[in-house]
Amino acid sequence: MKKLALLVAVFMAAVLPAAAETGALKLSLWDEIAVAVPNNIHDVQGVDLGIASKTATVTGVQFDFLFAQTEYDLTGASMSWIVNLANQVKGAQFGLLTKNDTIMGAQFGVVNLSMNSTTGLQWGFFNQAEYMKGLQLGFVNYAKNINGLQIGLLNIAENGWFPAMVIVNGRF
């Protein structure tokens, strides 16, 4: 128990000075109804935890039960049981519905939407990306422009080997 208390004290001493301008820990009830240590609910370097959260930037982990929304930048992992919305993700998104503008990393959900570009992996029932560089694994995959591979029941890539294919499609 003493080792755990010492570990927590060392972690807080290391994180809090570095995160003086940002919140190291944010607990959210709904949207922006939240508390943060230090008192910055808009920029989090550490952990954003709650029922439903809206945060400008997250560097670390964002985990919410209903929805997790990042407006500008997410570096790390964002997990939600229901809806996960972000602008730019560098890391991973988890949820029933994941949506972002740009992602460098991975999306895991039933429905994965990338409104601009995806570099990495989309894994779900339905995957959609405007510009895909990497791998889409799902029952239905769509990419307007792909540099990579789609594996699924129906694969649609406007610049792929074929506009629509079963099992495998892509372009390198």
Image: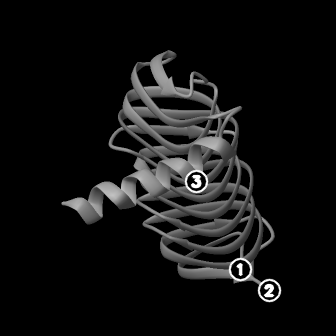
In the image, what residue occupies the spot 68% across and 46% down? 18
Residue that numbered label 1 is attached to: 148
Question: Is 163 located above or below residue 55 in the figure?
Answer: below
Q: How many marks?
A: 3
* Residue 56, x across and y down, in percent: 67, 30
Whether residues under marks 1 and 2 lie with C-beta atoms below 8 angstroms apart, the answer is yes
Is residue 164 rendered to the left or right of residue 172? left
Q: Nearer the viewer, mark 3 or mark 1?
A: 3
Which kind of residue does numbered mark 1 sit on?
Gly
Q: Between residues 140 and 66, which one lies in front from this camera angle?
A: 66
Question: Which residue is at the far top?
Answer: 33
* Residue 33, x across and y down, in percent: 45, 13
* Residue 148, x across and y down, in percent: 71, 80
Question: Which residue is at the far bottom?
Answer: 172
Q: Quadrant of residue 17?
A: top right
Q: Between residues 83 and 135, which one lies in front from this camera angle?
A: 83
> Which element is circle 3 on?
helix
Say which quadrant the N terminus sits in.
bottom left
Residue that numbered label 3 is attached to: 14
In the image, what residue occupies the spot 62% across and 60% down? 142
What distance separates the C-alpha of mark 3 from that of mark 2?
44 Å
Q: Between residues 33 and 86, which one lies in front from this camera angle?
A: 33
Asked if one can make out residue 60 in the rendered structure from this viewpoint, the answer is no
Residue that numbered label 2 is attached to: 172
Which kind of residue does numbered mark 2 sit on?
Phe
